[in-house]
Image (cartoon, rainbow, N blue to C red):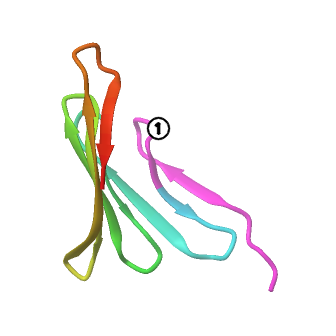
Amino acid sequence: MPRMPLIDTCDSYENLTSEVLGTGHVCTYTYDSLDCPLTMTLPDKSQIHYVHNADQLMALERITAGKTLYSHEYCYDLAGNHSCRGL
């Protein structure tokens, strides 16, 4: 099966909004008003949700059919360094 070239689409702020993978599958992305990622929709229509606190990533959640399959949480020390990560 021949592979297609990658095709990327960006918004006016140069955020990636969609990409067509070499297989022809499409991923789409959304962002908040600070250009932090909110969602990534995968070819199977499941989503990755990004949870932010100001400019720091606090959690990732994989959502399929409205249910959370798994999540990763991140925390930071006062200097902004990663201090823990949990599932």
Q: Residue at x 34, y 29 (%)?
A: 82
The answer to whether residue 37 is seen in the rendering is no
Q: Quadrant of the N terminus?
A: bottom right
The quadrant in which residue 67 appears is bottom left
Based on the picture, tell me whether residue 30 belongs to the magenta stretch: no
- Camera-nearest residue between 12 and 27: 27
Is 68 in front, or is 9?
A: 68
Please give the residue where the numbered disc 1 appears in the rendered image.
14
Name the residue rendered at 58%, 55% in the picture.
8
Boundaries of the magenta span: 1-17
Query: Can you give x and y, in whole percent of width and height, for residue 71 in the image?
Result: 28, 59
The reply, left or right, for residue 53 in relation to residue 50 is left
For residue 18, say whether it is visible.
Answer: yes
Residue 3 in the magenta stretch? The answer is yes
Q: Residue furthest bottom?
A: 1
Type of the residue with mark 1: Glu
Which quadrant of the view contains residue 20? bottom right
State the residue in front, 73 or 5.
73
Secondary structure mostly seen in magenta is loop
Q: Quadrant of residue 64?
A: bottom left
Q: Which quadrant does the C terminus fall into?
A: bottom left
Task: Where is residue 76? Give x, y as percent.
Answer: 26, 27
Q: Position of residue 58 (x, y in %)?
A: 24, 41
Q: Dot 1: within a 10 Å radius of its alpha carbon, few (fewer than 14), some, or many (20 or more) residues?
A: few
Where is 54 relative to 50, above or below?
Answer: above
SS of the residue under disc 1: loop
Residue 18 lies left or right of residue 71; in this view the side is: right
5 sits left or right of 58 in the view = right
Identify the residue at horizontal 52%, vertical 53% (top origin).
Answer: 9
